[in-house]
Structure formats: C-alpha cells, structure tokens
Image: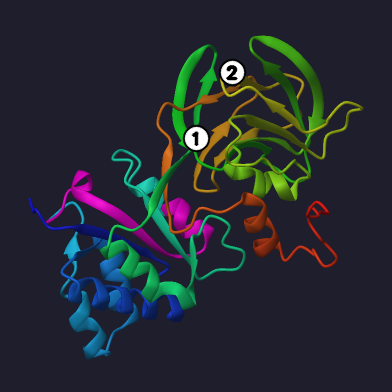
Amino acid sequence: MTADRNVLLVAHTGRQDAVKALIETIEQLVQAGLAPVMSVPQITEAKEFLAGDVASLSWLDKVNELGVKVAEDELELVMVLGGDGTILKAAEMVRESSTPLMGINLGHVGFLAESEREGLSNAVARVVAKDYVVKERLTLEVKVLVAGREVYRTWALNEATVEKSAAERMLEVALEVDGRPLSTFGCDGVIMATPTGSTAYAFSAGGPVVWPGVEAMLMVPLSAHALFARPMVVSPSSLIAVEVLERSSGTGVLWCDGRRTHDLPVGARVEVTRSEKPVRLARLRIGPFTDRLVNKFSLPVAGWRGPEEPKS
C-alpha cells in the first residue's frame, strides 16, 4: 500500500510513438513527484519492445506494478496514450474503481481523447496541478439469457452489438423495448449504443450523433431487410432486448466495445439497460461538443457568420 499520487499509464506498447510518449510521461511524472503505475503485462510488453535500449529501460524501473505495489482503488487518474481502442481497454482495466481516464490521442480520430500528442507535456502539467474536470459518461449493462437463465453479463461504454456469426447467413431477430415487441427482421445485426458510442460503430452504421449531455440509448439496425429499420433513440430508463429467433438461419455473437464477446445460440436473448456505474473522463477544457465534432471530423464551416450584433 502507498500514499503516493498514483497515475496509471496505459499505452499501445506495440507502437514506437506510443512507447516514446510513455517514456516521456514517466520522466515528467517522476520529476514532479508523482508515482507512475503500469499493469504487469504492459511493463513486460514495453520491456520487450525496448530490448537493448538501456536508457529507456531505466525509466521503466521507476514504474510501480498495478495490483502488486499499488491497488486499483489507490489510483488518482489513468493517462491513456493511444487511440480510442486503448481508452476502451483502460476503461475495462479500472471498471471496478471508476478511476477517471484522460486520453492522449496517438491514433486517428481519437474521439474520446482529450489532448493530441503535441499537447502531452501540458497534459502532464495539468495532471500534476490537478487542473482538470471529471465528466461522467453513461454506460450499458448487458445480459445474455438462454431458456430464461442468465448465462453472461458484461457492460459497454460505446456499444453492445448483436451480429451474425457467419458472413453468408442472415440473422433473424426480434426487437423489444420496455417489454413490448417492436419489429422482427433479417439483418446483419443490431447496435445498441450510448451517446458516447454514437460517434463510433453506430455512426458508421448511419445512426444519429447524440450530444454527451443527452441521456439516451440508441438502437441501430445493420443492413436490415425491413421497411421499418430506422435508427431509434430511446429513454435511458428503458430496457432494450434483441432475441435471436428460432427461424434464424444462423447463430449470433455479442460484441461489447469490440473487446468482450459471447456466442448467441438460436433462442438467445440480449437485454440492455443503463448501468448504475458510469465511466468518468478527465477533461482539460470544457467547450461545446459542436467544436469537438468539427475538429475531429474536419467538418467544413467556411462561410459561417454566427448571430449578428444588433444595429444601434
């Protein structure tokens, strides 16, 4: 046990730029008197990647091991060096403690990240000064039932997706909201997403972009053979269910955030509700979500004038 200010570092340890950023972050945290922490597997991966680089390996020796020297509930913050996939991995690692996550984007869009690579030093300085704001994001509780018995339970920050398990076969599903049937159709799958996930897989499937301040859940069919197969936004207090129908020509598979998976036999039922435990994101700047959309997707705004000042 330790009374240090512990900062967990999670990086894409198979990429040169991520490992370089990791070493820089370790150096700056140590110089500021904070204690860098990493998981044992990530320390091992980084050491293998840096084999022969004695100077860099010496910095890794200053890192405390998560679960060995530092417990999860002793973490002050998680700094994630990578893209959105790495942030989802970090969220999974600290799910039980709800430690805030701060993302430094080293990927492509990096929608969940708070800072870009060139802002790394400033981000570390803000962490040292505790100069950041923590915002909560809605998450999903996901259950799989077979013959009325719960066989699997997990959660999701972005989305839970029921998909066909074989490319050549269609999945026949029934959709349900709040205990009432909505529609049945053949499809490639159904995405059930959070507002955070509305800019991820659901966005690629044609779903709406939902502002983070809106509490809601989304249902987005994938390549559905039906007249009524529109993306839908439902209440955060609703129960959404997707059943794999007996007439389905193939089985399905559940994916949560692209990380956790479970096979769905014919007759399986997936229930999704709002989780009581949100994910907490550390923010360096509080600005309009509109600006984030424009910046991340490079949206054209040339010609915009804004509201005119009243003439005197």
In the rendered structure, find residue 139 and report the number of the disc placed on it: 1
SS under mark 2: loop
The answer to which quarter of the image holds residue 39 is bottom left
Label number found at residue 239: 2
Return the x and y of residue 125 as percentages of the image width and height. 32, 70
- Magenta region includes residue 35: no
Q: Is residue 14 visible?
A: no
Q: Tell me if residue 174 can be seen.
A: yes
Contact (CB < 8 A) between labels 1 and 2?
Answer: no
Residue at image coords 52%, 11%? 148
**Residue 211 located left or right of residue 19:** right
- Residue 89 place in picture, x, y as percent: 43, 53
Q: Which x, y percent locates residue 62?
A: 16, 73
Secondary element under disc 1, as helix, strand or loop, is loop
* Residue 59 position (above or below residue 309): below
Residue 277, picture quadrant:
top left
